[in-house]
Image: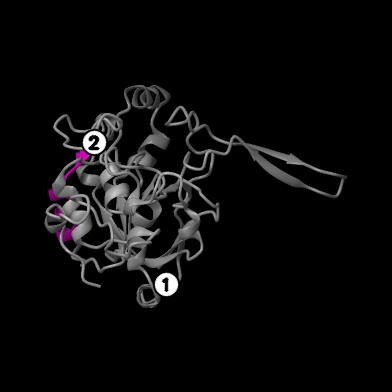
Amino acid sequence: MHLPRYAELLERGDAPPGSSWGLFGADDRIGTLNLVGPEQARAAADCVRTGESFTLDYPLDAFDPPLAPTRRAPVHRVFSRHADHRDDLLDGFYLQASTQLDGLRHRRHHVHGFYNGVPDGDDLGIHHWAERGIVARGLLLDVSAAAEHAEGRGVSAANLQSALDKQGVTPQPGDVLLLHTGWADWYQTAGTGQQERVRAERRFTGVEQTHEVLAWLWDHHFAAVVSDTYAFEMLPARSDSPFGGETDHGMMHQQLIALLGLAVGELWRLGPLAAVCARDDRWTCLLTAKPLNLRGGVGSPANATAVR
């Protein structure tokens, strides 16, 4: 499938500038996941050599106290009807409190609305992703050397390209970018005082808010872009960010999700996979992810696995 480059998207007159609206069809509800199909799944299977598998999910309660005040860790309750029976439930289950996928309903553009012009009240739920699942080639990109977690340093387009050149791997359309910064593992092992400072000051590692980063991500035609960071983007956003409007304070989630239709993942557990990729100097894997089949859902735990 031929797709225009990001620079061409910025010049569109038939849709919001910088958007992919209409490229996958007027009624599309899955965005860049259109780039994954049987051909990509079969190619991804060729990445399996040793059969090693890696969970890419942190526990549901891994980030407690929560990174976002509105996303508390769930409370697990076990109950029984009699001595030989057990059942369980989760109280306060916020679907984006740990390893997650942001669905296309997660962000609307402050001027143009939701992805592909879907009206606010219409069906843009994550169940559209769940019904097909995600089976793709995962490409791990290690930018941990460029990250400075205590201060929430940004990862630039130049950092992304430098890491790609160093690893000597070529992205393929439909790949899932697994961006390893090392942030989540750093946070998990940081002292209580350091964790409190990060949460209070909202300082998180992530990609910079620039058109160059958007161009780098879009022009490689990734089906999804995920990282081990809180928001995929750096926070606070760059002071010179051209994005966000009055509601997102310089963030470019509106561009990533609402305009480009990119599947975005956050807080993925990439450390163990990154270590093995570096050991073998082999950076691709078979990746599966299965969001919850929740009609109208905004986000979901990723339920992701990598197989090498």
* Residue displayed at 36% across by 46% down: 228
Residue 44, located in which quarter of the rendered image?
bottom left
| Residue in view at x 47 percent, y 64 percent | 133
Q: Quadrant of residue 251?
A: top left
Q: Position of residue 180 (x, y in %)?
A: 31, 50
Question: How many marks do you count on the picture?
Answer: 2
- Is residue 202 in the magenta section? no
Horizontal side, residue 44 vs residue 88: left or right: left
How crowded is the residue under tag 1: few (<14 C-alpha within 10 Å), some, or many (20+)?
few
Q: Are the residues flagged by discs 1 and 2 in contact, CB closer than 8 Å?
A: no
Indicate the secondary structure of the residue bearing disc 2.
loop
Q: Is residue 272 visible?
A: yes
Q: Position of residue 289 (x, y in %)?
A: 46, 59
The residue pinned by badge 2 equals: 148
* Identity, as a three-letter code, of the amino acid under mark 2: Glu
Q: Note whether 233 is above or below 222 in the view shown.
A: above
In the foreground, 193 or 199: 199
Direction from residue 261 to residue 213 in the image, left or right = left
Tell me the magenta residue range.
Answer: 153-166
Looking at the picture, tell me which residue is in the foreground, 35 or 18.
Answer: 18
Badge number at residue 286: none
Q: Which circle, 1 or 2, is nearer the viewer?
A: 2
**Mark positioned earlier in the residue sequence (1 or 2):** 1
Q: Is residue 138 above or below residue 153?
A: below
What residue would you read off at disc 1? 50
Residue 1 placement: quadrant: bottom left
Q: Residue 212's spot in the image, x, y percent?
A: 13, 48
